[in-house]
Image: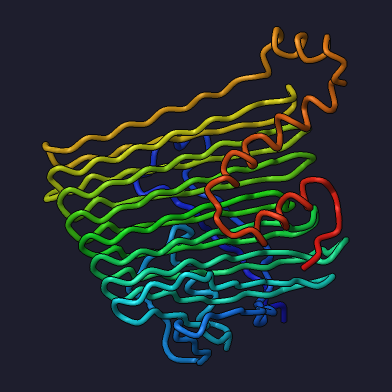
Amino acid sequence: MSQNKDMVINRLPALTWNHLGMNQSEIRDIPLPDAGTLLAEVPDVILHSTDNVKRLKDIATGCGSAVDDLLEQTDIPSSRFKTKAGETCEKPVRLDFRYGETPKNFNYVELTARENSAMTVVMDYRSAPGSAGFAGVQTKIRAEKNSLVRLVQVHRLGENMTFINDIGTEIGDGARFELIQLILGCGRTYEGMRTDLNGTGACLAMDTAYIVGGTQRLDMNYAVNHIGRRTLSEINASGVLRDRAFKLFRGTIDLRKGASGAKGNEKEDVLLLDDTVINQTIPLILCDEEDVEGNHGATIGKLDDELLFYMQSRGIPQDAIYEMLATAHVEALLEKVTDEKTKCRVRDFLKGESCHD
C-alpha cells in the first residue's frame, strides 16, 4: 500500500478571497521521506548535536502543522545548533543540503541563540543535474533575550524538484531575527515562515529575492505576529517572473492585543517579463490594538518601453537585457550577504557555471 499522502500547507491566518483559491495550497502524492544528506561546517564555539530527541512542537511554522505531522511519521533525526550565552560567533555555520537524482528527503534543524549571543547560519539547497523528486527542510528557531540570529538560505534546485522550506521562530526581549532568501531555481517551491515577536522590542528583518521562469511555481506564506510591546517587522520581497511561471505571495502582519507601539511593514516588487506569467499577491494586515502601525504595498509591472529602447539603442540585445534585469534583484540582495563563499556560489549559478564547492 502506498505511503504517499496529500498535504495542505501555506494557509492564510485569516481566510479571505475564497473564490480565488488563494487561501492555502495542496501538495498531492508526497512520499514518506528519508533523512537528507546534510554537510555541516560548524565553528568551535557553536554547540552541535544530532539526535532523535522530541522536536519543538511549541514553535509553529509558516507552512503549518501538516509538515509537523509528516515528520512525526518518520525517524528523521534532529540537527541542533546552539550558541553559548554571551558568545558572538564570527564565522557562519554552513549547512549544505545535497539531493541526488530521485530524492525523497527531509531534514529537521533547530537553531537556538542564548541570551546576549549572535550566530549566522547559511543554508544551501542544491540538487544533482536532472534530478526529479521531493525534498524539504523544516527549521525552528528560538532567539533568547538580546540575541541575534542571521539566516541565509540559497535555493539552487532543478526544474523537476518539489521543495518545501518551512520556518518557525520565537523572538524574545530585545532579540532580532534576520532572514535572507535567494530563490534561484526549483520546479515547485513552497516557502513558509512564521515569526512570533513575543518579547518587548523584538525585531524581524526579512528579505527575499527570486527568479521564477519556465513552468516553475513559487508559493510563499510569510506571517509575523506582533505580540510584545514595541516590536518591529520588515518583510521585503522582490523578484522576476518570465515565460509561464507562477508565483503566489501571502504576507500577513498580525498586530495583536497588547502589542502597543508595534510597527509592521511589508512590501513586494515584481517585474513581469512575459504576458504568459501568473502573479498573485495577498498583503494582509490584522489589527487588535490601537497604538500600532501597519503598512503594506506592492509594485507590479512590466519592463518600461523607454528603458528597453534606451538599452537596445546602445547595442544590448533584448535577451541580455532581460537576463540583466532578472539577476538585478538577486545581486541587490546579495550585497547584504557578508559570506564570500555564498556570494561566489550564487554568482556562479546565475552565470550557468559549475560551482566550485
What residue is at 69 percent from the left and 73 percent from the top? Answer: 31
Residue 67 or 298: which is nearer the viewer? 298
The C terminus lies in quadrant: bottom right
As drawn, 221 above or below 114? above
Q: Quadrant of residue 102?
A: bottom right
Give how far across and how far down residue 256 sits, in percent. Answer: 19, 48
Side of 47 relative to 21 (left or right):
left
Give how far across and how far down residue 291 sits, in percent. Answer: 12, 37
What residue is at 44 percent from the left and 86 percent from the top? Answer: 47
What residue is at 55 percent from the left and 56 percent from the top? Answer: 338
Side of 239 relative to 157 (left or right):
left
As drawn, 243 above or below 153? above
Give how far across and how far down residue 192 sits, in percent. Answer: 50, 56
The N terminus lies in quadrant: bottom right
Give how far across and how far down residue 263 sits, in percent. Answer: 24, 40
Q: How many marks?
A: 0
Side of 88 relative to 180 (left or right):
left
Q: Quadrant of residue 176?
A: bottom left
As drawn, 99 above or below 345? below
Q: Which coloring applies here?
A: rainbow
Residue 297 or 22: which is nearer the viewer? 297
As drawn, 257 above or below 5? above
Residue 295 or 63: which is nearer the viewer? 295
